[in-house]
Image (spheres, grey):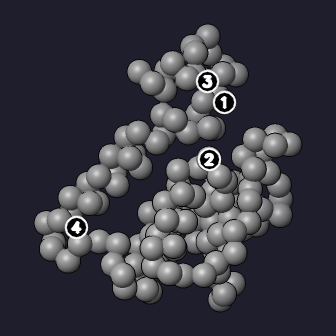
Amino acid sequence: MKLYGYWRSSCSWRVRIALHYKGLSYVHRSVDLVADGGQQFDMGYRVLNPMAQVPTLALSSGEHLTQSVAILEYLEEVHPNPALLPSDVRERAHVRQLVEVINSGIQPLQNLAVLQRLRGQSSLDPKGWARA
C-alpha cells in the first residue's frame, strides 16, 4: 500500500495511526499542500484523487481510496485485528459520534482550503475565525 498524505493533515494522521496500530506496512508519499501552490493540484496526483485532497490510499489492486473515515472503515473490514472499534455496539456508536464531531464539526473550519478562501475573499482574520 501507498499512503499519499501531508504531515500537517489531521486526516492523513488518522490513517497513519491506524496503519501503525494494525501493524500494516505501507510506503508514505508526501503531497505538500502548500509548496508550489499545492502539489495536490498536480495532474499526476489528481488522477489518484480527483478532489485534490489528502489522504489517498493506493491499494496493491490499483484502486485508490480517499477520505480518511472511508479508508479507516476499509482497513477495519479487511484487517479486523487489532480492532479500531470497540466490540460493544453502543461504544462503537459513541466512537462514530466522536468521529463525526471532528470530521464534520471541527475539521472543516480549520481546513487549509477554507482558510485560504477566507484569506483571499474576506476582511476576516482566517485564523481568528477558525478559533471562534
Residue occupied by mark 3: 118
Q: CA distance from mark 4 to mark 3?
A: 36 Å
Instruction: Specify the amino acid type for callout 2.
Output: Arg
Q: Among all residues in the image, which is located at the extreme top?
A: 123
Q: Residue at x 86, y 42 (%)?
A: 36
Residue 4 is marked as none
Pointer 1 or 4: first along the chain: 4
Residue 92 in sight? yes
Which badge, 4 or 3, comes first in the chain's sequence?
4
**Which label number is shown at residue 92?**
4
Q: Tell me: residue 124, above or below residue 22.
A: above
Nearer to us of marks 1 and 4 is: 4
Location of the N terminus by quadrant is bottom right
Question: Which label sits on residue 116?
Answer: 1
Spatial separation of the CA atoms under disc 1 and disc 4: 35 Å
The numbered disc on residue 8 is 2
Residue type beneath disc 4: Arg
Quarter occupied by residue 90: bottom left
Mark pair 2, 3: CA separation: 19 Å
* Residue 118 position by quadrant: top right
User: In the figure, is residue 72 to the left or right of 94?
Assistant: right
